[in-house]
Image (cartoon, rainbow, N blue to C red):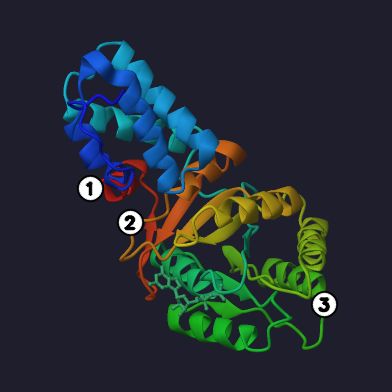
């Protein structure tokens, strides 16, 4: 039995949260909550996160907080925000606490996701806050990667590490951290990494190696491992995050390409299942187009 007047509605019609909420009747809420859960599945939340978010709404309904559809909309948003916040702090970046030493940030992600652009945006952001940035061309596989990174370094006032050609990525990163420490004027080391090799196992092995090389040169580093995910790729991003997370211990997510799309719902699943907070979102191709992640605004954009 459906909650609305017995009229038969198609499933397509129910793919819109607005429609569902318009039909809300607190006295017959369970069917509507089920429709809501289906809708969340339809916008890439994935089964676990859809259930968790819906449970959050159900709890609010059962506490008597949802008389009207608007109340449910608020409950839905609050429930998603709860999940997005459950993985920890989105607002801070892990930094090196030791005086006089740079912080090392490793940036990972598959090619095409926006990794290079994001490195440029991060560099700009750190520069704006007064930090001196060194960029490290740790993607030695893709021919143009170092060149592109150098362009971003120039644009954002960062220095490029002095990496010898034909060196393995681990060695490139080891030497870069060494160089940054020796220079003494570098606050942030931003290490690029490969986003594609012949296969996934090779890629992960390489990234594990890079991570180890960094730690070997500096205990406690990298201080952040940021995973760049293309916000338009739906639930694919969950698998990506899982693989990268298991290999190199991702500490934060940067969700790109959120301009002009209300997608990105799948990231709720990533946060829920892997417990990794989203730290930034990319909203364009320019260096200014990186924003701190704010759960409320993100959810408002998902369900306008
Ligand atoms: P990489 O292969 O992961 O290094 O990806 P790139 O940084 O080269 O980005 C791939 C494409 O996505 C480029 O055309 C970028 O300009 C574009 N891009 C990256 N981030 C964003 C974003 O936040 N919004 C939009 N609209 N495009 C982006």
State yes or no: Cβ of the residue under disc 3 lies below 8 Å from any atom of ligand 1: no
Q: CA distance from mark 1 to mark 2?
A: 9 Å
Where residue 79 is drawn, which disc sits there?
none
- x and y percent of residue 264 in the render? 42, 54
How crowded pointer 3 is (Cα within 10 Å; few <14, some 14-19, many 20+) is rated as some
Answer with the quarter of the image where residue 261 lies: bottom left
Given residues 103 and 56, the one toward you in this image is 56
Q: State the residue position of label 2.
A: 262
Taking the image as shown, residue 176 lies to the left or right of residue 282, namely right
Residue at the spot x=77%, y=61% of the render?
204
Where residue 304 is drawn, which disc sits there?
1
How crowded pointer 1 is (Cα within 10 Å; few <14, some 14-19, many 20+) is rated as few
Q: Residue furthest top?
A: 63
How crowded pointer 2 is (Cα within 10 Å; few <14, some 14-19, many 20+) is rated as some
- x and y percent of residue 150 in the render? 56, 85
Disc 1 to disc 2: CB gap under 8 Å: yes
Q: Secondary structure at mark 1?
A: loop
Q: Is residue 229 above or below residue 57?
A: below
Residue at the spot x=57%, y=81% of the render?
149
State yes or no: Cβ of the residue under disc 1 lies below 8 Å from any atom of ligand 1: no
């Amino acid at each position: 039995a459906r909650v609305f007047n017995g009229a038969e509605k198609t499933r397509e019609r129910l793919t819109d949260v607005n429609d569902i909420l318009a039909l809300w009747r607190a006295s017959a809420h369970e069917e509507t909550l089920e429709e809501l859960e289906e809708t969340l599945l339809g916008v890439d939340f994935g089964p676990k996160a859809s259930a968790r978010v819906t449970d959050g709404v159900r709890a609010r309904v059962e506490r008597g907080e949802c008389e009207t559809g608007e109340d449910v909309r608020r409950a839905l948003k609050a429930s998603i925000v709860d999940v997005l916040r459950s993985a920890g702090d989105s607002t801070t970046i892990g930094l090196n606490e030791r005086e006089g030493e740079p912080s090392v940030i490793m940036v990972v992600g598959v090619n095409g996701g926006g990794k290079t652009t994001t490195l440029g945006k991060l560099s700009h952001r750190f520069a704006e806050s007064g930090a001196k940035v060194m960029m490290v061309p740790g993607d030695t596989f893709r021919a143009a990667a170092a060149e592109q990174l150098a362009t971003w370094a120039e644009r954002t006032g960062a220095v490029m590490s002095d990496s010898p050609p034909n060196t393995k990525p681990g060695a490139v990163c080891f030497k870069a951290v060494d160089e940054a420490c020796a220079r003494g004027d570098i606050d942030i080391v931003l290490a690029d990494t490969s986003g594609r090799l012949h296969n996934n196992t090779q890629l992960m092995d390489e990234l594990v190696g890079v991570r180890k090389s960094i730690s070997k040169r500096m205990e406690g580093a990298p201080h952040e491992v940021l995973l760049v995910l293309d916000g338009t790729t739906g639930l694919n991003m969950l698998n990506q995050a899982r693989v990268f997370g298991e290999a190199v211990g991702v500490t934060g997510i940067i969700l790109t390409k959120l301009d002009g799309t209300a997608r990105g719902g799948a990231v709720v699943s990533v946060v829920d299942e892997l417990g990794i907070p989203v730290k930034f979102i990319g909203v364009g191709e320019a260096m200014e187009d990186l924003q701190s992640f704010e759960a409320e605004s993100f959810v408002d954009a998902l369900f306008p």
